[in-house]
Amino acid sequence: MLNSTRIAQVFIIDQQPVVRMGLRALLEQDGDLHVCGEASDMLGALQQWKSTNPDVVIIDLELNGACSGLDLVQRIRAVNREIPILVYSMLEDTHYVERALSAGARGFCSKRDRPRAVVDAVRQVLLGKLALDEPLSSRLLSRAIGGRHVNDVASDPTAQILSNRELEVFGLIGRGNKTAEIARSLKLSVKTVETHRLRIREKLGLTDSAKLAYAAVRWVHDPHGGSDGASTPQRKVAGY
């Protein structure tokens, strides 16, 4: 817990400059929080890390370059196991929340929430508390009751077998994004996204793009993440 008289130093990692600007304005308006640095990707974040010495980090899951926000959460947690990390993202599907918490984040805040929600969440994680809004907490509880646990990502075959970036691409496919749209969103080339799609298909045993799209939509919209007893990715997406 920080000394109440000390201004907490916040580091923001988000690919959108306007988001970083808005967060800075929100966080600094009360005087107890100060943005000590910002970056759009892993490289920029790690280059500034030592010189800024933040007390808390805010990370978006969608970052520029080959690294996903989940990768960066894991990287930061490997360097500093104590620093609180808050994920702030549009990717609010329960799958991502679970994976972020398992990676080491202490809170998750949706960009669709009211603006002040992120300020409240930052203060929560600085106090050593878990920061989740009521809808997210309820969804996680429902999944836990159904046999899926926040700290057991291995219980979701898809989450277990796909890399962080592949899971991110898979989720975007499930929300109806085309290859070019995913490339623009993640600041990747179309060829790189196509490679991710191919690897996802290979790992999940899907023979064509139509089955990939169906499986992705089913994964995104199934609130229990395959709690019907499927034990392998192939069985999880069976029934085409």
Image (cartoon, helix red, strand yellow):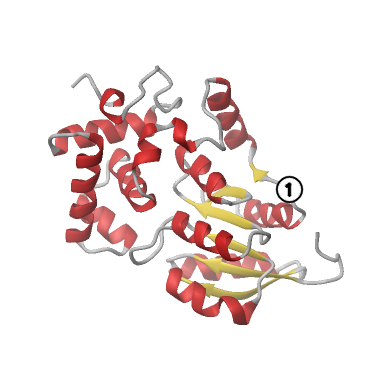
Q: How many marks?
A: 1
Residue 91 or residue 24, whichever sits in front: 91
Residue 22 lies left or right of residue 207; in this view the side is right
On the image, which quarter does residue 11 sit in?
bottom right
Question: Label 1: how many residues lie within 10 Å, few (<14), some (14-19) or many (20+)?
Answer: some
Residue at the extreme bottom of the image, as rendered? 51
Q: Residue at x 66, y 75 (%)?
A: 53
User: Which of the image's four quarters has the C terminus?
Assistant: top left
Where does label 1 land, which residue?
Answer: 129
Image location of residue 14, percent across then percent down:
48, 65
On the image, which quarter does residue 50 sit in?
bottom right
User: Which of the image's four quarters has the N terminus?
Assistant: bottom right
Image location of residue 137, percent across then percent down:
62, 34
Q: Residue at x 64, y 35 (%)?
A: 134
Image location of residue 15, percent across then percent down:
43, 66
Residue 18 lies left or right of residue 79; in this view the side is left
On the image, which quarter does residue 218 sit in?
top left
Residue 180 or residue 3, whichever sits in front: 3
Query: Looking at the image, is 153 positioned above or below residue 225?
Result: below
Residue 134 or residue 51, whichever sits in front: 51
Q: Residue at x 50, y 79 (%)?
A: 47
Element marked by disc 1: loop
Image location of residue 219, percent across then percent down:
35, 32
Q: Residue flagged by tag 1: what amino acid is it?
A: Lys
Query: Looking at the image, is 198 positioned above or below residue 82?
Result: above
